[in-house]
Amino acid sequence: MHALIRVSGLVALLVPAVLFAQMLFAKAVFAQNFPGGKPARILVGFSPGGGVDTTARMMAQALGDLWGNTVLVENRPGAAGNVANEVTAKAPPDGYTMVLCNIGSHAITPARFAKKLSYDPIGDFAFPVMIGGVLNVFMVHPSMPVRSLQQYIDYARKAPGKLNFGSSGVGASPHLSIELWKMMSKINIVHVPYKGAAQALGDAISGHIESSVGNLAGAPLAAIKAGRVRALAVTSGVRSPQLPEVPTFAESGVPGYDVTGWYGLCTQSRVPQAILARINADGNKILAGPLKQRLEDQGVTVTPGTPEQFLAHVKVEIAKWTKVVADAKLEGD
C-alpha cells in the first residue's frame, strides 16, 4: 500500500514536469518554423496614405520577400492608433501580428489615456524593431500670404482663432507637435482633426483649410516638391536632408523647439524570445539593404538597434509627452 502511494506520488510529480517539457518543445518547434505556416500581418492605426501606412507597406514587402511568406498590411484606424494597439495586445503571442508602432500610438496615446486603456502600452508589448525617426512638416496653401513660420506667427497673432490647421487626428504626433508650438509661441489657431493624414493634406492642397501638419514621410514630401503646398518649417532639431531649404521651428522664431517622431515594429509581449530575436535580426537586415534608401527618400531617418534600446526610448517618450498633454489639457475623455 505504501509502495503504491509512493509510486502514485511520483507519477503526480512527473506528469506536470513532462507536460512542461512538452510545452517547451512545442514552443521551440514553433519558433523554428516562424515565419512560415501562415501569413503575417502589420497593423496600422491610421487610414491608408499617411507616413505610418507608407512605412508599414515598405516593411511588409521587404519582410515578405526575405521570409518567402505573405506579410499583409491591415489598416485599423481610430483613437490615434489605440484600436490597432488593442488588437495587437490581445493577439495570439506567435509573432504573426505586429503593429507599426510610432510616437502617436506608443507615447502620446498612453499619455492621453493612461488610466483608460484596455492594455498596458509597455507590459503588453515587445519592441523588436526600431525603424527610425521621422519629422513633421508644417505646410500652408500656396495662396496664404506668408512665406515663413515667423510670418505665419505674426499673421495668427493679428487674427486669433481665425486660422486653422489639419492633422491626422486628435492626440497624434502631428497634432501634439503644433499644440506644443502654440504654447511656446502664444498663438491661437484652430485644430481640424481628420481620420488620416492623407485627408488633411488633401484639404490643404485644395484650399479648404489654410494649413496642415503631417509626417514628412509619404505624401507631404511629394506635395511640397510639386508646389501643391508650401512648407514653412520642420519640427526636428535639424533640417531634413530631403528638404534642406526648409528651416526648423527653432530657426524660425521658436528657440528650443524639437519634435522628432519615430516608427518601429511592435508585437505581443508574450511572443517567444526566439521569435522576437528572429524579427529583430531580420528587421535590422532589411533596414541595412535597399529598403534603407527607399525609407530615407521618403523622409525616414533609419536608426535600427536592439529591442532594449527601443524600449528605453519609448519610456522616455511617454514621460515627455505626458507633460505636454497635461500642459495642453488634452487628456482623453
Image (cartoon, rainbow, N blue to C red):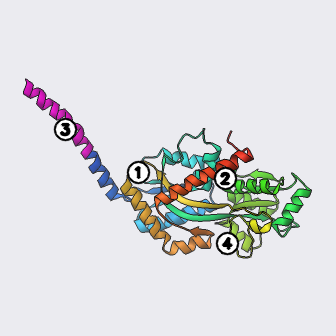
Q: What residue is disc 2 on?
A: 172
Residue in the image at 68% along x and 52% along y? 195
Residue in front for this viewpoint, 157 or 49: 157
- In the structure shown, which secondary structural element does the residue marked by tag 2 occupy? loop
x and y percent of residue 180 in the render?
Answer: 74, 54
> What amino acid type is highlighted by mark number 1?
Val
Q: Are marks 1 and 3 in contact (CB under 8 Å)?
A: no
Residue 271 - label: 1
State the image quarter where residue 273 is shown: bottom left
Residue 308 coordinates in the image, percent (x, y): 47, 57
Q: Amino acid at mark 3?
A: Leu
Quick check: marks 4 and 1 in contact, CB under 8 Å? no
> Disc 2 versus disc 3: distance between alpha carbons?
53 Å
Type of amino acid under label 2: Ala
Q: Circle 4 sits in a helix, a strand or a loop, which is it?
A: loop
Neighbour class for label 1 at 10 Å: few (<14), some, many (≥20)?
some
Q: Quadrant of the C terminus?
A: top right
Q: Is residue 218 above or below residue 111?
A: below
Q: Is residue 94 magenta?
A: no
| Number of the label disc, if any, that sits on residue 240 | 4
Disc 4 versus disc 1: nearer the observer: 4
Give the residue at x 60% y 38%.
Answer: 116
Q: Give the Cα separation between the discs numbered 1 and 2.
A: 27 Å
